[in-house]
Image (cartoon, rainbow, N blue to C red):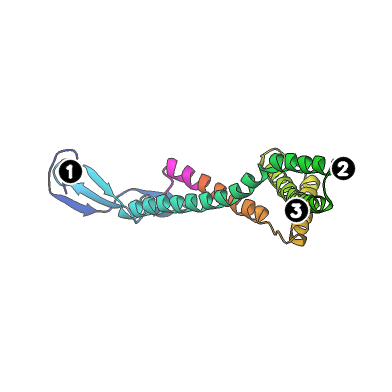
Amino acid sequence: MKCSQCGNEKLIKTVIPMKVSSDGYLYDLFPKDIDAYLCTNCGHYEFFSMKKVKDYENLVSQIEEKRVQLKDLEKELSVYIKNIEKLEQLNSEIIEIENQLKNLDITIRKQQELKTELSVLNTKKEILELYSRIIEIENQLDSGLPIETIKQSALRHEIEELEFELKRKNMPSSISSIYSQIRPLREEIRQMEHHLENGEI
Ligand SMILES: [Zn+2]
């Protein structure tokens, strides 16, 4: 080890003679996890803390881990969102079939086929609309705008009903559960990044 001021190589491990007094007791100003060395030539102090280095590394890797978790959840959510984007297309397909059904010249067989197809598309549409409404509410709750407590619980209740409806259609949704995991995770990451930026390790 070299003194960063004069280059002298003889440094001695020492304690920091800085104490604060409170209630008549003396307290060390420097935490125990900081190692202090004194240059025997110029009197300069050198401070080291491997514990802080480890704490810093831990925090960085925790943030990284949480970011990966967040990304996975957002990916799960994006599957639903991509599906919802198909709603418009679905609507025009439904209209198209309804128009075909109005044609009096089609055979009974063809008519049956179209009706079956229509029923499948309508079910799909209902499911996507339920997904869409849940996401709409979750985003509303997420917007950061103040929402009255009564309004909030009404929205939560609506989500429960929409989820029940989806379950009844054998299409259980995890949208709400994804949101409830994403929210605290975002907050945790935000706080950890704040600690890191401010050196509060
Ligand atoms: Zn020195």
Disc 2, SS: loop
* Mark whose residue sits in front, 2 or 1: 2
Residue 118: x %, y % from top left: 78, 49
In this picture, residue 62 sits left or right of residue 165: left
167, 134: nearer the viewer: 167
194, 167: nearer the viewer: 167
Residue 3's disc is 1
| Sequence-wise first label, 3 or 1 | 1
Residue drawn at (48%, 51%) of the image: 68
54, 87: nearer the viewer: 87
Mark 2 is surrounded, within 10 Å at the Cα level, by few (under 14), some (14 to 19) or many (20 or more) other residues, namely few
Q: CA distance from mark 3 to mark 1?
A: 79 Å
Task: Examine the residues drawn in magenta and state their main secondary structure.
Answer: helix
Span of residues in magenta: 192-201
| Sequence-wise first label, 2 or 3 | 2
Mark 3 is surrounded, within 10 Å at the Cα level, by few (under 14), some (14 to 19) or many (20 or more) other residues, namely few
Q: Is residue 27 magenta?
A: no
Tell me which amino acid carries mark 3: Val
Tally of numbered discs: 3
Q: Which residue is mark 2?
A: 104
Tell me which amino acid carries mark 1: Cys
Q: Is mark 1 within 8 Å of ligand 1?
A: yes
